[in-house]
Amino acid sequence: MEIVIAIAAKIAEYTVGPVGQWLCYSCHFNINIENLKNQEKNLRDAKNRVQHLIDAASRNGEEIEDDVKTWLIRADHITELATTKLHEIEEEAGTGSSNAACLNLKHRHQLSREAKKIAENIAELVKNGNFDRVSYRPASEGMEMTRNMDYNYMAMVSRMTMVKEIMEALGNADIDKIGVWGMPGVGKSTLMKEIARQAKEEKLFNEVVMTMVTNSPDVRRIQGAIAYKLDLNFDQEADEKDRASHLQRRLSKDKKVLVILDDIWKAFDLQEMGIPSKGCKVVMISRDRDVLISGMDTQKAIHELKILQKDEAWNLFEKMAGDSFQDRPEVRGIATKIAEKCAGLPIALVIVSKALKNKSLGIWKDALVQLTRPAPENDSKIWSPIYSCIHLSYEHLVGEEVKSLFLLCAQQDYYIFYQDLLRYGFGLGLFLNIYTLEEARNRLESLLSNLQDSCLLLESPHSSKEFNMHDLVRDVAKIIASKNHNMFVMRDDGGQKAWPDVDALNRCEALSIHGGDIHKHPNKMECPKLRFFHVDCKDTLNLKIPNIFFQGMEKLEVLSLRNMQLSSLFPLTNLQTLCLDGCMLGDIHGIGELKNLVILSLARSDISNLLREIGSLTRLRLLDLSNCSKLRVIPPNVLSSLVNLEELYMRKTYVQWEVEGPSNEGKNASLAELKKLSHLITLEIHIRNGMKLPKDLFSKKLERYKIRIGDIMPWETFNGATFSRTLKLKLNGSFQLDSGIKMLLKRTEYLYLDESNRTESVLYELNREDFQQLKHLHIQNSGNIKHIPKLRTPAIAFPILETFVLKHMISLEEICQGNLPFTSFKSLKVLNVENCKKLRFIFSSSIARGLSLLEELNITRCNNVGAIFMKEEEDGIEDQEDMMLFGRLQTLVLKDLPKLVGFLSTKDSFMTDCRETNSEGNHDLQLPLLHHHQLSFPNLKILHLRGLSKIKHVWSNVNGCESLKSLEIHDCGAMEEIVAREDGTDPTTRLLFPSLNYLRLDGLPKLKWFFQGVCTLESSSSKELHGQGGTLFGPEEIAFPNLTNLNLRNLPKIKHVWNKDPQTILRFQNLQHITASRCKRLKSLFPASVGSCLKQLKTITIDDFCGMEEIVKVEGGEAARRTLVFVFPQVTYLSLSYLPRLECFYKGVHISKWPMLKKIKIEKCNKVEVFASGLVSEETVEKRQSQMSIKQPIFLVDEMSFPSLEILNISIMKKLEIIWYGLVAASPTRLDISNCDSLEAVYEEHEGQDGKESHALTTTQLLRAMSLYSLPKMRNIWNIKDCHQRHMYSFPNLLDIDVKGCESLKSLFPAASVAASLPQLQSLKIHDCGVMEEIVAREDGADPSTRLLFPSLTLLRLDGLPKLEWFFQGVRTLESSSSSKELHEQGGTLFGIEEVAFPNLTKLRLRCLPKIKHVWSKDPQTILRFQNLQKITVQKCASLKSLFPTLVDGCLKQLKKISIHNCGVEEIVGAEGGVVGRTLVFVFPQVTSFYLENLSRLECFYKGVHILKWPMLKKMKIEKCDRVEVFASGLVNFEESVEEKQSHMSIKQSIFLVNEMSFPSLEILKIRRMEKLEIIWNMKDSHQRHMYSFPNLLDIDVKGCESLKSLFPAASVAASLPQLQSLKIHDCGVMEEIVAREDGTDPTTRLLFPSLNFLSLDELPKLKWFFQGLHTLELSLSKELHEQGGTLFGIEEMSFPSLEILKIRRMEELEMIWNMKDCYQRHMYSFPNLLEINVKGCESLKSLFPAASVAASLPQLQSLKIHDCGVMEEIVVREDGTDPTTRLLFPSLNFLSLDELPKLKWFFQGLRTLESSLSKELHEQGGTLFGIEEMSFPSLEI
């Protein structure tokens, strides 16, 4: 029963339940449908609400979240489903059918069920649609921009380096704040955008926020910008503090947020802004370094962005300008200049290039003007943005002081010097509330720091006391200065060149002149407001300023003039600073009136005596006398009077100081005066004689000093730094240190000590504490010092010493004796020890451990040094952890240390003589130089070893040499391997030099290999080879991935560089340059596996007797029979020199390809017979090898082997017969072949494989220059067998042909067609070809109309061609009349009628052409074809009778220089029959130089009657023309009969027939060695005087004219030389007078040579006088004297007001130079400008000056030399009645030489001396040169 009940229950469960459910859906049909309608409406509303949010987000540029997009898709789908279902229900209800009720009931159930399900889904979807936010802000492709304009970032080297540094800082967890600073417009923002992009791309940060702070920070805006990027919403009511707190919490949660704050002008609190001080990466960008470092605390990571390099700047400019100057070279030229004016500043480059993009040439030119001379209005499109950018930085300078300093800097030249700013600024009162220079220095340092921090001033890399401005910053500063402050600058390099106008000068407050029209200065400057005036130009030394120039400058406070001449000094009473650097000072006695002067600089001036008036300038605080090389005298008490003096500069000034004491009064100052200057704090002085040094001269008040005592070389700086406290001592044996010197030593930063003459060093007097401030110590020549003294106190020695130099310490045994503290030398960076012969080691290991900062170690020429550092017994350096670390050492140089056994060695290993040392038992001697278990050099970059004769190995392991870049090892005779192989070495050991780029091994006679790897030893094939040595780099043992330069020299044991395993050479993948020299056993350079392994190789050089037989080693077996291809893709240079065994490149069949090869040089490879041979691809190996057995070429090539060849240089190849053989296609641009004894032709056809001639000859299309020297067997350059081959020789680009020493060459060109194929030929030179008969050969059957044209030839030189008959034997010439036909058959005319033309020839040189009789045919058409000839030179043409044909006039209008030497020329222009009777005019309108030399047959210019005109002739020289008797004769008029003129000519023939216009421009006339020349100017009567006019003649030089009795035939001719500056007359044996006296001469005639400054009369034994004036003859007292001669210059007869140099030599009969018989004539002799008198070999001259008054008339005389005057008794004669008070003063004389004067008694016999009873007898006898107070030479140098 229970079972039945259970079954019934289960049946009911499966039937009643579903039935009920089914009935339920049917009963609730209406409810479900209604619910669906309501849910569908809810969904529509929700979807609309979300869509509204989406639309709003899209309008804001936000991205829609993915889940919102998915929700919308689902909502659309379910809405459509619900709508469809409801529509179906409505249709069902509308049918109203009662049929099939059961079926309808079933359908209602289904619909009801579906509706409920859809409604439930909609309800869930609506619930999920309540989004907090539907969108997000995308990663801003733009973060907020800091500039209105933007430009693309360019990856440039300088920027990539900066990006790398900043990215590393961003990845450093210890750095939170990073600063980036740079000048305005340098590209800081652009760079940071790139960094932000990379940081996001590399996922360093999740978010990158970049915002701009600006000069007026808006905190709320900045907070909002950051929050916006972080999707952080602030409460609208929150204040800045609440927002900051909210923002800080957000940033603290996410550590991967980068905040970039751009354009920061002043410091602010990051936390107040909402940026955490820790835990958040912040990059701050500013123009002001100080803001970032001091204000924002970024000192850990501060980066300066600098301007672009020149090439980078141009690349940016070119990119921004687009194709503006593509194919427009005229625009490109302007663009280059504009880019240079932008001076690497990106903002300028971008603005300017974009503004000019695609603009016309005129606009580009105008832009250049705008940038060169920017207008003050600065409103142009180009200039305005640049100006605004920089001006903003200026406006943000705080305080007027720093702004004024900025404008003062703009007044300076390119280099701005600290000392100038100090002197000018102090004089202008620029520093407020400053009263001393020391205070001014401190203030200036602060202001300069501000300008540098603001990037408005740049520090020079040369010195910390030197600055400069960016060009555009200077331009802006000049605009501000001129516009707002009336400060003007004149320059040559752009900007204002002209002087300001009158109105501007009236307003002007500052004027600086660095160029421009300085010489157009006004006579007087009316500048009532001018406070600063500075002139510093290159060409002002000859500029003379008038006295009244400064009268209108009453307010002038600073006057700075450089390199000028001053006649006097105007009293500018308001002047504070006066700088006259490099000036030639005249009368400046008025300087004493400048009572307000506080700064005076006379540096580099010519002052010789310091004026006493300077002592009255008691307000003076700075006096600069530096580099006053002539200064010798400083009057006593002048310096001591300057009681307020703070700074005194006297470096390179050598005053003759007196020793302190009462006896020096009135002579010179004593150094003791310096002790009275109580305010002196800066002193620079050189005291040559230390014995004159007063005791305790130097006081503790000296803050800065540069003091040299002794004869020391000029001032030095170290590593560009000038030390403020420098002391250099070169001491003799008696010099003692006083307390003052010791005080200086204690404070000195730079000490130079030279004790070459002392027995005991001053160092023994010092203690350790005396070196506490020393930074640089240089000790040399202390020959008696055995050790740097055992310092007696426990103080640390040299705690801050950075540089230590020891040189030539020949007795030094130890540097430091005794135990020094571990930290001694702890700051040492540079240690240099040189030539210390007894030194055994440098430091002990304990001291070496303290050298942690050492960067450079240089030990040289120390013959006994056995170790650099001595390992002390207690210092056990065996533990790896206890090795000696030189962490900063970058440079290690060890040279010429023959006893060195190790870098770190025990005392026993080197302290005994090497003969007594048991090397086998001594562990140290077996160790490498740099043993890796003991030493570590992690940063070593340069290792240079030379002359280490005991060192066998450098390393045993190279770990720690990762930074090594350069390794050089020279002359180490025992070196067997560079890296030693230790026993037990891991077989897998591989050596890696990852950074090495330069390796040089030189002079290592025992070197077998670089490293003997275990892998090599285990290799059976190479084991024996390695045992003997010979392969430098073995298989897989060593790698140099970055090696670029390999230099191998003098390695006699090396047979191969690389092992044949291809993996070996592959480890040199970046090798660019390889040189092998003097490696006698080196048989090949590369293994056969080289293939294309060395893809970066650029140069190969093999020379100097290497034993090389082939460049690439041939391998045995099948490899040798294969055709190999060797490709060197980057090689540009190949040199093979002095390789006597070299036969070929590779002995097997091969092709070598050199796609980038530009130059090949092959020299003295005596086995080579063929340079290059083509290899046909079908050719069999056997055939090639059979050919090669006959003549082996160096190169086997194909048509693509040398596509880039430019230069082929082949020389000293004795067996070379063929250059190109067969199918070779190479087109060098330059071909140089010399000294190849067997070479017969350069270009020659050879038979091809089919027996026919090959037509693929070497192409000549690109050849530009050909040089062929010393090729004795060469018969043809071009070997043309028949006329059909002519077309094969085309040289369309050949510019230069130079042929010399080709003794078998009969002609240069084999046919006219070859010569005609040279349209670009510019230079043709042919030398020393002994059988050459013609330049262009005439072929049989040549076209009779053939004319040769050389359209581009500008230079033609034919030299040493003894058989040359003509240039080209044209057919027309031969067919012409019999007269010329016979002439051509005989030869003799170089250029025939119409045969050849040179329309652009400018230079023609003919030399050693003995068969040439005429250059041109007499037909005028011949010479007309040379219409552009400018220079003609003819030498050693013995048969040449004349140079030009008769009809030359008007043909050579461009001719400028004529030179004829050593020829058989009888006349310059050949006289033709039929025209001799006419008067011809020859005009040479452009000739400036005319030389005739050694023309033994020359008689005249032209044998007919003629006139010559040389309107432009400036220089004429005629030498050794032996037949010439008259230089020039005048032709009165053209009407003069030919017969009359010819009758005159038959008597004495002149070279030139002239009139008054023949030589209007002549400046230099030289006539030399003309033995028959009797007359220079032939003047028959007074009517011809006017014909000799030489208004511009500057120099006359006559020498060796033995027949010439006078120079000028009349005073009138001499008087026609107003410009004559130099007159030299030498070796004219019969000359009696310089100017001849004519009969009837005006008695008042006086000769004036107003411009003559140099007069030299030498070897004129018969000269009586200069000019025998009538006035002299009429004087009864001197008439007889003049008849006899003997007085050079007579009374009132001549005047030389400008004479500076007078030389009188070897005038044996000369008794007096000046004739003066009474005291009334003294005033007649005034030589105010005479600088030098030189008298030599005047055997009759008893005195130089006839009276003291004449000697006294020489105020400028600087040099007086009197030699070899055998009877001279006195220099100055004492006259009767001489004033007893007469004193001779030679104020400027600095050189006096009296030599070989055997009878000289005294200089001047003064009356006062005679009146002195004690000295009267002495003077009568003579013997005292300079008497008591009789003469003074204040400027004389000893």
Image: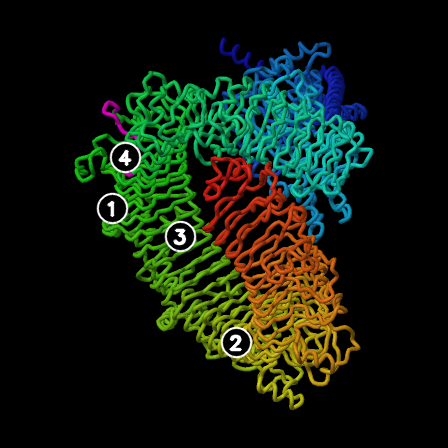
Q: Identify the residue shown where x is 70% and y is 34%.
A: 512
Considering the numbered disc 1 on the image, is that residue within a helix, a strand or a loop?
helix
Q: Which mark is residue 836?
A: none
Q: Which residues are magenta?
A: 863-875
- Please name the amino acid that badge 3 sits on: Thr
Q: Which of the 4 image quadrants contains residue 88?
A: top right
Nearer mark to the viewer, of 1 and 2? 2
Task: Say which of 497 and 988 sits in front.
Answer: 497
Relative horizontal placement of residue 352, taking residue 663 as reference (left or right): right
Spatial CA span between label 3 and label 2: 42 Å
Considering the numbered disc 3 on the image, is that residue within a helix, a strand or a loop?
strand
The answer to whether residue 1247 of the structure is visible from this angle is no
Magenta region, main secondary structure:
loop
According to the picture, the residue beneath numbered tag 4 turns out to be 838
Nearer mark to the viewer, of 4 and 3? 4
Disc 1 to disc 2: CB gap under 8 Å: no
According to the picture, the residue beneath numbered tag 3 turns out to be 1075
Q: Earlier in the sequence, mark 4 or mark 3?
A: 4
- Please name the amino acid that badge 2 sits on: Leu
According to the picture, the residue beneath numbered tag 2 turns out to be 1361
Q: Which of the 4 image quadrants contains residue 1392?
A: bottom right
Task: State the image coordinates of residue 33 (x, y, percent, origin top left).
Answer: 74, 18
Q: Earlier in the sequence, mark 1 or mark 4?
A: 4
- Establish if 253 lies above or below 653: above
Disc 4 to disc 3: CB gap under 8 Å: no
Spatial CA span between label 1 and label 2: 70 Å
According to the picture, the residue beneath numbered tag 1 turns out to be 1018
CA neighbours of label 3 inside 10 A, class few (<14), some (14 to 19), many (20+)? some
CA neighbours of label 1 inside 10 A, class few (<14), some (14 to 19), many (20+)? few
Q: Identify the residue shown where x is 70% and y is 11%.
A: 235
- Establish if 449 lies above or below 1369: above
